[in-house]
Amino acid sequence: MGLFNRRGGKRAEVTGVPTIEASGGSNAAGRDVVGSVAQHIDSAVVLPPEAYGPAADVPAPPMLRNIPRMEGFIGRQEALNRLDAAFTTPGGVVVQAVHGLGGIGKSALAAHWAAQRFTGNPRWWITADSKTSVDGGLAELGRALQPALTGLPEDFLIERAVQWLATHEDWLIVLDNVDHRDDIRFLLDRVTTGRFLITTRRATHWSRHAGTLRLNVLSPDEAVDLFTRILHAPQDRPAGDVAALCAELGYLPLAVEQAASYCAETGTGPRTYLRMLAESPAQMFADTTEGGDAERTIARIWRITLDRLTDTPLAGDILRILAWYAPKGIPRTLLDDLMPAPALTKAIGRLIAYSMITDSGDGTLSVHRLVQALARTPDADDPHRHPAAIDHAREQATECLNRAFPPDTAGAPETWPQCRALLPHAQALSEHTPAEHDTANAASLSDRTGLFLLTHGMIARATEHLHRAVAGRVRVLGEDHPETLTSRSNLAMAYEWAGDLSRAIPLYERTLADSVRVLGEDHPYTLASRNNLAIAYGSAGDLSRAIPLHERTLADSVRVLGEDHPYTLTSRNNLAMAYGSAGDLSRAIPLHERTLADRVRVLGEDHPDTLASRNNLAMAYGSAGDLSRAIPLHEQTLGDSVRVLGADHPHTLISRNNLAIAYEWAGDLSRAVPLYERTLADCVRVLGEDHPTTRLVRANLDTARSL
C-alpha cells in the first residue's frame, strides 16, 4: 500500500526553485486542466521541481490504494458480477452508482469489489458525503501520487489530482456515501477516463449520469452465514433461532452485524436477542458493542438520513404512517387525502430518492421492515420519533386504511380485490397496535376486516378481528352505542359460522335485549337483531323458538316498515326457510312464491335478493319432490346469476351447487358429478379450501360419487 502524509504536514523546501505569483483566487477544481497550476500558488510558496512537470508524465506509485478493509463480507455474487460487467466497458470514463437503503451494505460491496476484483492502479477511496470531504480526499490523492508536493496548498493538490486522473487510465476512484451530485459534478465533468464507483442512498440522481445498481438485502442463507461468522460459535446456536432473528431483521447487513456483535460480546442467544428486540426496540436499535462505532447503528444511520429530509416535514410524517403497514404492496392511494397532490408527490419522491422507501412500479410502495420498526418506536431523544408524533402517525395510518376499506363486502365481489390488497396492512396495523390504544377508527377497521375474512371463510381470523372491534367500541363508544351493538351482532355471527352456537346464541340474545332497551322494540336494528337470533335458533335445530320469533319479526316488520320494505321481504323469506326446515312445505312453498313475486315487483327480476328467492323456491320444490319445476327454476337462477353477478360470485357458486343437487335428486349423476366438480374447483379458487361453502360442495361431491 502506498504511504502518504495528511494535509497540514511539513512543507517541502527545495533550494534554488523560484517562487510563483498567483494570478487569481478562483477554485482550482473549476479551471481547465492545461495551464492552471501556476495560478493557485501563493507567492510565498516554493514549488518543488515535480510541480512543473505535466501530470500526464507522473506515474502512480506501485500498489497505491487506501481501500478500507471490510470484515465479514458475504455473498453478493450477482452484484459483483454486474460491477465486473459495467467496468469492463471499453473506452472513456465509466461511472457506476450503487444505491440503496442505509445499512444495506453499499460501502462493503464497493470496498470488496475494489480490493478483490479491480486490478488497476491506483484504487482510491474518498468519503464523499460533502464537498469538503471530496476536496480533502482529492488532496490526499494528490499527496499520495507525488509525496514531494506534501505541504502545498489544498487547492493546488486538488487540481494536481484532477489533472492526473484526466490524463491517465486504469484507475479506480470510489466516492463513498455521495449525498449531493453537485459535490462531485466538477470531478465527473472534467475527467473523461478511468473508473468511478459511487455509493449513495440517493436512488434518483444518477440515471442520466451513471450506470446504476440497486442493492437489496442479503438472502436468508447469506444473512445466517454472516451472523454465524461474527458470532464464532454456530454449533452452540440453534439454526432455527438464527434464521428467525435474521428474518425479523429483514436480512439487512448492518442490522445482522449489529445483532451478531452484541450476541458475541454479551453471550446473548439469538432467541433472547429477538425477545429483547420485541420488548425494547429503541435500545436494541441504538446499542453497539464495547469499542463499536456508535455512528454505525441502525438508529444512527437512519436518523442521519431523516435529518437530510427535515426541509420536507411531510416526508417524515409519511414514513411514520407507512411504518404501521405491511412492508410490501402499500397502495399509494392510501395517502391521497393527507395533502394536496404536489406536496404529497414531492415528499414521497424524496423518501424514494433517499432509499427510505421503494416505488414498486405498480402503484404500491415498499418499506424495509426495520425502517418501519424504527419509525414506529418512540424515542424522546430522536426528533423524528417523538412519542406524540408516532401516536399521531398511528391514528393517521388507521384513518387512511379504514377510509379505504369497503364497509360492506359480503355481497359486493367487485370490492374484493381492493380488500385483498388492504388486508395485509390491516393485519399488520392490528399486530403493531396494542388493543388498549384502539380508537374509533381502529375498531371500525377491525369490524370491516373481520367481516371480509368471515365472508371468505377465514373464521378464526375473522373472530379475532371482530372480538377486538367489540372491545374497542365498548371502550371508546360505550356498551350501548349502536356501533357497539352492530359489532356484537357481527361477532355472534362469526361464532355461529364456526358452529359455536353455545356462544353465538347468548350473544345474539344479549344484543337483542340491549337493542330493545336502547333503541326500542320497533327500531329497524332491533328487528334485524330479532331476525338474526331466530336464524341462530334454527341453526341449532330449535325450531320451536325459531319459527315464533320469525313470525313475530315478520309481523313487526310489516307494521313498522310496510309490506314491501326490503327488510320485510327478507323476514318473509327467512320465515319460509324456517317452515321448510321444519318440513312444513305446505306453508313454506306459498310463502316463497309470494316473496319471489313481491321481490320481482319491488326490486326487479335481476336484483340479488330476487335471485336468492328464486333459488330458495327451487330448493323448496325439490324438497317436495317436484323436480319438474325445481330443475328449470334452478337452471334459470344459475343463468341469471352468471349474467348479473358473475361466474365467481358466492351466490352463483351456491346456485350451481344447488342445481347439481337437483340433478342428483333426479338420478342424473352424469350431469350432477361434473357440475359438483366444477363448482368445487371454483369455490377453492374463489373462496378458499376452508370456506363453509367449499366444505359443503366437497361433501356433496363425495356423496354423489359414492352413489
Image (cartoon, rainbow, N blue to C red):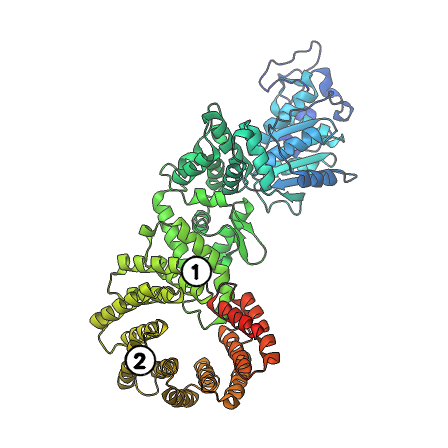
Q: In percent of the image, x 32 and y 64: which residue is there? A: 502
Residue 22 is marked as none
Q: Is residue 707 left or right of residue 566?
A: right
Q: Quadrant of the C terminus?
A: bottom right
Asked if one can make out residue 162 in the rendered structure from this viewpoint, the answer is no
Neighbour class for label 2 at 10 Å: few (<14), some, many (≥20)?
A: many
Q: Which residue is mark 1?
A: 337
Q: In percent of the image, x 71 and y 39: which residue is there? A: 81
Residue 73 x/y as whole percent: 62, 32
Residue in front for this viewpoint, 490 or 644: 490
Residue 300 x/y as whole percent: 47, 35
Circle count: 2
Residue found at the far front of this picture: 707
Up-down: is 518 above or below 30?
A: below
Residue in front for this viewpoint, 321 or 56: 321
Circle 1 or circle 2, nearest the eye: 2
Q: Are marks 1 and 2 in contact (CB under 8 Å)?
A: no
In the rendered image, which quarter is residue 59 located in?
top right
Asked if one can make out residue 101 in the rendered structure from this viewpoint, the answer is yes
Up-down: is 413 above or below 18?
A: below
Q: Earlier in the sequence, mark 1 or mark 2?
A: 1
For marks 1 and 2, give the CA distance: 49 Å
Residue in front for this viewpoint, 164 or 315: 315
Up-down: is 361 above or below 124?
A: below
Three-letter residue code for mark 1: Asp
Q: Quadrant of the N terminus?
A: top right
Q: Which residue is mark 2?
A: 547
In the rendered image, which quarter is residue 192 located in?
top right
Q: In percent of the image, x 63 and y 35: which residue is there? A: 109
